[in-house]
Image (tube, grey):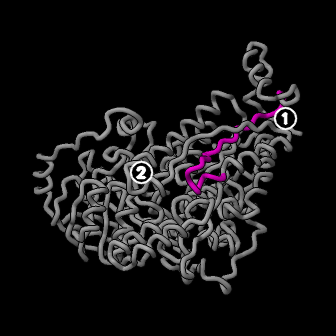
Amino acid sequence: MKEINKHSRRLTQDESQPASQAMLYAVGLTDEDMQKAQVGIVSTGYDGNPCNMHLNRLKDEVKIECKIADLVGLGFNTIGVSDGISMGTSGMNYSLVSRDIIADSIETVMNAQSYDALIAIVGCDKNMPGAVMSMLRLNRPSIMMYGGTIASGNYKGKKLNIVSAFEALGQKVAGEIEEDEYREIIKRSIPGAGACGGMYTANTMASAIECMGFSLPYNSSIPAENPNKLSESERHAVAIKNLLEQDLKPLDIISKKSIENAIALVNALGGSTNAVLHFLAIAHAADIDFTLEDFQRVSDKTPLIADLKPSGKYLMEDVHGIGGTPAIMKYLLDGGYLHGDCMTVTGKTLAENLADVVSIEFEDQDVIFPTDKALKTSGNIQILYGNLASEGAVAKISGNEGLLFEGKAVVYDGEQAANTGISNGEVEKGDVVVIRYVGPKGGPGMPEMLKPTSLIMGAGLGKSVALITDGRFSGGTHGFVVGHITPEAQSGGTIGLLKTGDIIRISAEDNTINVLISEEELAQRKLVWVAKKPTHTKGVLYKYAKTVSSASKGCVTDEF
């Protein structure tokens, strides 16, 4: 066996650290164990969320496999927030905040305990970027292990998922379905463990991080309740030992090219706009210069080839059925859309990992299309600029919504006011719903606007109403939507100066977003504008609002 460079050596062999040694003996380590590498196995598992409820079981399996691999696995936990439960409530303000708490807490335990390596077992959306951010700060051999996607629900022969529940509410409000049918959809939407089933944020980030090289091949597409998910534990123990022996660390793996690979896959799959926030933050943690312009550059040259929810009809379980994420990556690599020379956590390059992967058969399935029949010739992630977003905004354009929208603004300060207004029929065809003061500072926490967009969809207005916000969107959102508008309202951005009745023009043809009033009028409004009083004056949301960067910089909290 190759010699392993152990950070924990000072705890296990330094005679000046008797208390450390005593404590390690107390948890059951033997003299032989004291010579072994210590692997921190962190889980974001907790009982109250299907995305995460099975992760501690995976953690226990990984710990057993680490022992078999002659390593010492030491488990610990960090937090998680269920977006599905907090959506549409004040709890959603804590969702994005949890990403940075996860990164901070993993960094804290790993450094305080001097563990040699890290395996992070994660489920819901913010778990994954938080784990990867900590890996890059620590720069010790590390692997991310995704808990997997959920199985689809079923009602009257129709596949259901988490967004079905939100859209059913809109249908009920619009009088299209009765209470009994609504309740049945709610009960059947989520049948068990796993993260939300479409190409929403969890599956987007899991797939992209695999493509970036930080998780093992197939990890992102094996469903949570598939028998192969438990057997992945052995693969992860063997892989972390290999990384320790090679002393291959995260900063040896990540590069601008590997982030480009991740973003190319996001666009090819029709992934979540949240990927923009998270990969900006990941790049920041790695000190890599990656900006909104880089997202647009990659999107421009990457075709949308996946017919996946929320804009399409298939789920992540269907991706698994046609060969998994590696099959799609192989097709993109062969087409010149990925950099094959990027290193990965297997100790091999991306091209080497994909060499023996079975190619996609396009004749037998319509989940993934060949590039000559792409659903859209460029990616779905588009970066917009204009007098409404001088520092940028992010749109998710699948092609189904059209490329141009111009309409009258209906302005709401906050999500709850918007939900009430939409439900009361205040929004009509041709309107542009504006939800402001929900940015990273103004929210605070930049909550997701899935409930308002689902109410719009459920009311049958999805193709005739646009929505813009300085907040963000769930990966389950679809329709003509623009988020991450910067500067945000709380920071004096133009979105805070809008009035109901203003005409807003959004163009995905030249990637612009403007309010059609004069600069003189905007300047006059700016003179009388006053920032909204903070909604939190202590605690984690207060600290977040004081330290968080803008959305155009990834909402990081360690750059101020």
Left or right of 28 on screen, residue 256: left
Three-letter amino acid code at disc 1? Answer: Glu
Three-letter amino acid code at disc 2? Answer: Met
The main secondary structure of the magenta stretch is loop
* Residue 203 at x, y percent in the picture: 57, 61
Instruction: Look at the image and give the residue range highlighted in magenta.
Output: 34-54
Q: Residue at x 25, y 64 (%)?
A: 421
Q: Residues within 10 Å of mark 2 (few under 14, many from 20)?
A: many
- Front-most of residues 330 and 7: 7
* Residue 330 at x, y percent in the picture: 68, 69
Residue 379 seen in the figure: no
* Residue 104 at x, y percent in the picture: 54, 36
Residue at mark 2: 92
Q: CA distance from mark 2 to mark 1?
A: 46 Å
Residue 446 seen in the figure: yes
Left or right of 430 on screen, residue 48: right
Residue at mark 1: 3
Q: Where 34 sits versus 316, above or below?
A: above
Q: Tell me the quarter of the picture where residue 38 sits.
A: top right
Q: Tell me the quarter of the picture where residue 229 sits.
A: bottom right
As for residue 39 lying within the magenta part, the answer is: yes
Farthest front residue in view: 180
- Front-most of residues 302 and 326: 326
Q: Earlier in the sequence, mark 2 or mark 1?
A: 1
* Residue 363 at x, y percent in the picture: 67, 87
